[in-house]
Image (spheres, rainbow, N blue to C red):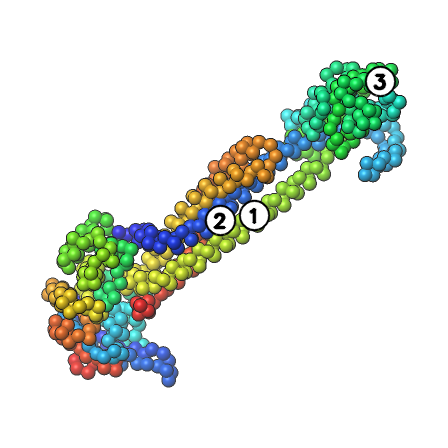
Amino acid sequence: MSDIIASGLTKQYGQGSLAVTALDNVELRISSGEFVAVMGQSGSGKSTLLSILGALNTPSSGTLTVDELDIYSLNQDQRADFRREYLGFVFQSFHLLPYLNVLENVMIPLAVIAGSRRNKEEKALAALAEVGLDRKANRLPSEISGGEQERVAIARAVVNDPPILLADEPTGNLDSRTGAEVMDLIGRLNDKGRTIVMVTHSEENARHAGRILRLADGRFVDV
Amino acid sequence: MNLNAIAIANIKRRKAKAAFVLTGLLLAVATVVALLGLRQAVSFNMIHQLEQYGANIVILPQSDSLALSYGGISLGGVSFDVRKIHEEELQQVYTIPYRQNIAALGPVVLGVVSANDHDVLLTGLDFETTPVLKPWWRIHGATPSHEDQVLLGAEAARLLGLASGDTLRIENSDLIVSGVLEPSGSQDDQLIFTPLPAAQRILGKEGQISMAEVAALCHGCPIDEMVAHIAMALPNTQVMAIQQVVESRMQAMDHFETFAYGVCGVVIVVSGLMVLVSMMGNVRERAAEIGVFRAIGYRRRHVMRIIFLEAGILALVGGALGYALGQVVMRLTLPLFTIGDAQAMHHHGGHGDPLLPVLAVGLSVAVGLVASVYPALMASRMDPNEALRAI
């Protein structure tokens, strides 16, 4: 069980008269295994919400609880441990390291945990097989297509089997056909029991989700 | 896959930047190794030269006199109760505790004689000791090997109009000039030298000597203690160390040491700054990458460890290469700083110190790591959210 419960989440940037409210008293509950799409205009607060859910951005007020852990009461190292154990991130720009090959990129999250190299390689190859790229394990990111890079990023996000996957515009840099393939892949990961929170502009992509949340001016307008 | 692999892969990817850091550390270590090696070699060379410098202790008859001379101009002197030194007494010198440090003991007898109608100072020497006691002598001809031979100082030869092979009449003896000294600018230029027994006979001082010169090996021997011990062994004499020679040489050595340490310090600071600037640039360029590391669960110390690993690997390689380069530079420049056998000096210099390679690599790693502390802290403190948004 990895229920996500956000209570009274508010995030302000800046101070005084210059303060901008990105999130305004947001209440949210995402059940374990749920696939939630967060939509909204640019500046609506969806990326801020995703970064707070990812334990990367301390809210101005409110609490975030995952598995009864109050995430923002943890110190920096504990939060890093939480991200490593509970979360997988898929970024719009992939953020693969260009000097590591596909297999090594997928192994990055495993570099700081105990285990033999062989065991880590087996895990990484299994994750690559899950996204259909195990045959391109020795290629550099520059030697594969954008869609394949996104799938490598997804393999990296799930290699240590986190219960929650956070995706920020996962098809934003892909053509529609490749984007559809990536969304199918994310759907399959959800089918296996992972909780998915995806920020997207695309109505078509959002339809893969079981629930769509719409944000405007830092508030949910249609939960 | 571990953090080492990430660090090594990043070094391979950023070859130019890695080469910059490596070159900075390499040059610093090479400079330090070369200077420290030269310092050791020059120090050994100086001690070696001091040992070969000739007499550094003189034994004079005890007297209550004041020398009235200045800058080589003698105005005579007032002497009271000058005691004589007998030749056999000198053997007491070999009873002192530091006798193994005595390289040579040379008795000298002095007296004014008439030679070819000129008054000259006749000096009787033991020519077997002169290579040690007067290593600066350069002779046209040969040293006297018989009692009827004489060696002339350059100025004495000029005044008397004599050269090797000529005959010189001293008092009632005819002596053959075996050789002439090259001008040395010392008092030796004015003198006539004969074997000690010949001079004693001509001067009527059989069994007596005027003074004695001692060459003591000074490396590791306390010259002041030797002087005191000789004075105790020869109670009727005045024993003096020629301190000025030793001290001026040691002062020159001190200046060179200060210079070497100063240059080493500056080079180390500059190389540290090179590493600092390069690693900070590296960290700034990799903001997104560091953001990804933090987002996927790397702790701050994991990020710091990657930066330190990169700096440490480069410093290790830079230190090893710098040591090798420093040895080559020292070997090439050693002849400029030393007199005599440069290879022997090199052996006693940096090459002979087994700790130097360890110190060189240790220094490089220490500079690399210390200079990377701030960049590593900067990397570890990056807000992952900000780092990812910055792209």
Residue that badge 3 annotates? B169
Q: Nearer the viewer, residue B87 or B141?
A: B141
Tell me what residue is drawn at x 87 percent, y 28 percent. B81
Chain of the residue under label 1: B
Residue that badge 1 annotates? B261
Q: Nearer the viewer, residue A34 or B150?
A: B150
Tell me what residue is drawn at x 22 percent, y 68 percent. A173
Query: Quick one: label 1 or label 2, which is nearer the N terminus?
Result: 2
Q: Can residue B91 be seen at all in this image of the molecule?
A: no
Query: Quick one: label 1 or label 3, which is nearer the N terminus?
Result: 3
Q: Amino acid at mark 2?
A: Ala
Q: Amino acid at mark 1?
A: Tyr
Left/right of residue B67 with respect to residue B268 in the rendered view: right
Residue B306 percent across, percent down from the top left:
34, 55
Within 10 Å of disc 3 (Cα), the crowding (few <14, some 14-19, many 20+) is few
Q: Secondary structure at mark 1?
A: helix
Which tag is nearer the camera, tag 1 or tag 2?
2
Disc 1/disc 3 C-alpha distance (Å): 60 Å
Residue A128 percent across, percent down from the top left:
17, 56
Query: Quick one: label 3 or label 2, which is nearer the N terminus?
Result: 2
Within 10 Å of disc 2 (Cα), the crowding (few <14, some 14-19, many 20+) is many
Task: Tell me where residue B40 sits by quadrant.
Answer: top right
Chain of the residue under label 3: B
Residue B184 percent across, percent down from the top left:
74, 32
Which tag is nearer the camera, tag 1 or tag 3?
3
